[in-house]
Amino acid sequence: MSDTAKYRIAPSILSADFARLGEEVDAVLAAGADIVHFDVMDNHYVPNLTIGPMVCEALRKYGITAPIDVHLMVEPVDDLIVRFADAGASYITFHPEASRHVDRSIKLIRDKGCMPGLVLNPATRLEVVEHVLDQLDMLLLMSVNPGFGGQSFLPYVVEKIKQARALIDSRNLDVHLEVDGGIKLENLATVAAAGADTFVAGSAIFGADDYQHVIAQMREVLASV
Ligand code: DX5
Ligand code: ZN
């Protein structure tokens, strides 16, 4: 895959300035980001607590029209799926460990008019998605343990990205392969070459002084893959 238009950059607002969230999201989109990655943590499934559906709805009311990629790190998931769908989410992804009935939760997301995805933790086997892959719009592979921004990329996930790409392609599916955690300019090419097409970056983008510059540098790296 060398067509950069196939690659999507998804800044994680976890590293944004929450006091100015609307402006921050506007700024990264104006700087060339494609989708807004929205991390939802419940201090139960993960040891951190972030933002809920009211904030998603507020971004929509503020005027954000780009896709909002809601990453649920909550347990259970079904109630918040409904609330985020009503709040304007585009993608809703969840961790299979956090739903007692994974197939039902996927169908709930679809029934609510959103695009479903599953998220696999670094140590979770790819086989978990095998039977439901064709129902998904997104497969998200975590390259850090979920819960915090600014952690280091776990290199063993690269092999899993390759296996996931092979699985998706072997079935001719139109499922996006997203990677989340520790993505920086230095490892972006490796992650893209392994087969990912959607790149979450929190600290790498919001930690930069110039969002436009860092996103342009990311595009440059992706163009060389
Ligand atoms: C971690 C979150 C990530 C996080 C990534 O649990 O799911 O989306 O914001 O942050 P960086 O890019 O800083 O690793
Ligand atoms: Zn995330």
Image (cartoon, rainbow, N blue to C red):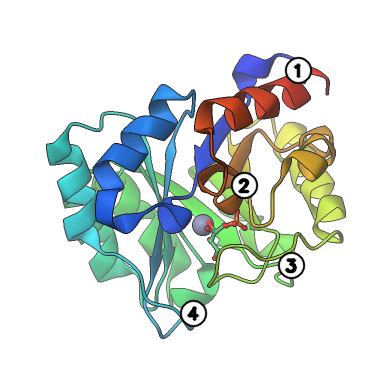
As drawn, the label of residue 223 is: 1
Whichever of labels 3 and 1 marks the residue nearer the N terminus, that label is 3
Residue 14: x and y in percent read: 44, 58
Q: Amino acid at mark 3?
A: Arg
Q: Is mark 3 within 8 Å of ligand 1?
A: no
Q: Amino acid at mark 1?
A: Ala
Q: Amino acid at mark 4?
A: Val
Q: Which residue is mark 3?
A: 125
- At horizontal 40% and vertical 23% (from top left) the residue drawn is 30
Q: Which residue is mark 2?
A: 204
Q: Nearer the viewer, residue 171 or 121?
A: 121
Q: Is mark 4 within 8 Å of ligand 1?
A: yes
Whichever of labels 2 and 3 marks the residue nearer the N terminus, that label is 3
Q: Is mark 2 within 8 Å of ligand 1?
A: yes
Q: Secondary structure at mark 1?
A: helix
As drawn, the label of residue 141 is: none
Whichever of labels 1 and 4 marks the residue nearer the N terminus, that label is 4
Callout 3 crowding tier (Cα within 10 Å): few <14, some 14–19, many ≥20: few
Residue 89: x and y in percent read: 29, 45
Residue 221: x and y in percent read: 77, 26
Foreground mark, 4 or 2? 2
Between the C-alphas of marks 3 and 4, the distance is: 19 Å
Residue 173: x and y in percent read: 63, 32
Q: Is residue 174 above or below residue 1?
A: below
Foreground mark, 2 or 3? 2
**Disc 3 vs disc 4: Cβ atoms closer than 8 Å?**
no
Residue 174 appearing in the image: no
Q: Which residue is mark 4?
A: 46
Whichever of labels 3 and 4 marks the residue nearer the N terminus, that label is 4
Quarter of the image where the C terminus is located: top right
